[in-house]
Amino acid sequence: MTSVANNKPEILTKLGVGSGIDTTALIDALVKAETDGTKEQLENKEADYKAQISAFSQIKSNLKVFNDNLELIQKNNSLGYQGSTSDKTVATFSANGNSAAQSVNSSLTVTSLAKAHTLTGPSLSSASTTVGARTINIAFGTWSADPTQGGGQSHTANSLDAVSVTASSSTTLAQLRDMINSAASDSDNDGQQDVTAVILYDGSNYMLSLKSQFGAANEMKITDNHASSPVYAYDTTDGAQLTQRVAGTNSSFTVDGVSMTRSSNNIDDLYSGMTLDLLSTSDSAITIKSEVDLEAARTSITDFVTTFNDVMKSLQSYREDDPNNEESGLLAGDSLLRSLMSEMRESNSSAIAGYEGGPYYLSNLGVKTLRDGTLSFADPSMLERSFKNNAESLRSFFKDQIVSDNANIIPLRYSIADTTPGSYAVSVSSGSATVGGVSTSKSGTTYTVASGDPNGMALTINSANTSGTIHYGRSFITQLQEKLDTFLKFNGLIESKLAGSRQRLSELATKQDNLNDRIASLYSRYETQYSAMESAIAGLNETSNLLENAFKRNE
């Protein structure tokens, strides 16, 4: 008879005990078949989001560096003119960037320098000595004569705000100084405090020193209401209790034979776009010059083109396909990257309004946009031609401005958010004014615009009937920085993009945890099922062995 052993299934013949199946490998294969697709999808998304975070973090860093470079370029004050003097100990002469400069070759003689009115108080043994209860009021203006010279003097107040402080019986000299400095302001918006208080130590005693702004029209009149000892007074009622150390005076000088005075030694209205700083008097004339010098401007524009191109090429690299592995660019098709590059390209062709003779364009300076979005400064001679035609074309690249062509019409303020750059005709008739055809509201000599393109602009107008033009311009660099700020600021577009990617990474981590739980559950279920199968097969194998042994005994 044929042996049962010869007719056993081949697998039992080969493997012997149990099923002979590598159930561990089988379970691994089954779990992988059910979960690998989801796992791969999650891993791919994780890699994509991490790559996007890395890419946009680098882009943000590059843009910040670019923006810092723009700041440095914008601070270049050599806007086509270079000032000089034949004696720098007497005066300096430099371009200030406030308006287009001009060629100058003049003689200068300095007769006197402007000085600030300086008064000192009584001598005290310590800065912590009390000054007594009193109210001190400081007004500014012009004295007809020094109050120390007897009666008959008068003080004519100017437009600066008076300063008033009240000391108590416990107020110290140091506290009085601080009270005056805290109460003082820059009421004429010239960048200088109207009065400054300090404590001087002369080697033996301490005294309060008060110093006004420079000029004969900024001398102080000080009242002190202490009934019995008004020691901080400097007026016609109580006399010159304070000691005048320096009288307020104007600077006096002659330019090309024309005598003139100013209230300051820093003079920026002598020649358009140039500042003359008087440093000392001179027995003889010195020469002041302003000459065309475009070298610094060429360097700045070249630096801009170089840094702009570096950024654009970096951005483009994230969009281009990889020629080595035929994969699409990391950020190919990304809308934010496309928007960023588009904004940067458009900035190069945008009009720069608000400058005399404008609007101007980057191309006026010899900078051209190439087909790939990068820039070329291949024709610096065009910069020179444009500059000689109108120097404002160069200023429009570097400098913001709000200027008036009429000394009676003074720009006071504007709104970055609301005022549109442009040149606005100002017409004043019988005390009523329009700016760019828009009516204004009036408060004293201040005229404010509340609608239209000049919305937010305020002017000081010192004539009831006059006209002029206000030029309000935001430079090319400023406009580009404003575009960059949309992407770079704390809650800007790039940070929002990064926050979204980080949030999706967090969500992926949750999904990965859920997948891991599912994998563990599948392993547990399959192990239970195959354990039961192995037990059943082991039982069958045992029965098979018993039958085989029984047949062998019967042979």
Image (tube, helix red, strand yellow):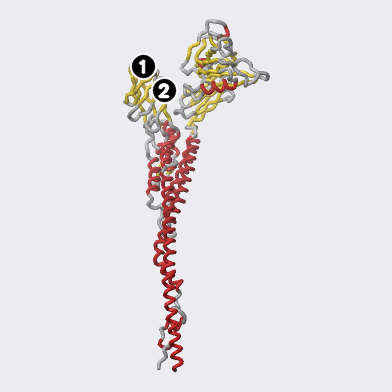
Q: Say if mark 1 contacts mark 2, CB within 8 Å.
A: no
Q: Quadrant of residue 43?
A: bottom left
Using the image, determine if residue 116 lies above or below residue 488. Answer: above
Query: Which label number is shown at residue 368?
Result: none
Residue 25: % across, % down: 45, 71
Q: Residue furthest right?
A: 204
Percent from the top left, x then y, of residue 186? 49, 23
Q: Is residue 410 above or below residue 247?
A: below
Front-most of 124 and 370?
A: 124
Q: Quadrant of the N terminus?
A: bottom left
- Say which of 496 and 333 sits in front: 496
Q: Is residue 478 visible?
A: yes
- The secondary element bearing badge 2 is classed as strand
Q: Quadrant of residue 385?
A: top left
Residue 365 lies in quadrant = top left
Label 1: how many Cα within 10 Å (few below 14, some 14–19, many 20+)? some
Image quarter hosting the C terminus:
bottom left
Q: Amino acid at mark 1?
A: Ala
The residue type indicated by label 2 comes to: Ile
Provide the secondary structure element on which disc 1 rests: loop
Residue at x 43% of width, y 70% of height? 528
Q: Position of residue 135 (x, y in %)?
A: 53, 15
For residue 37, side relative to residue 232 (left or right): left
Q: Circle 2 is placed at which residue position? A: 410
The residue to which callout 1 is attached is 464
Report, in whole angstroms, how far the alpha carbon at label 1 lies from the one at label 2: 14 Å
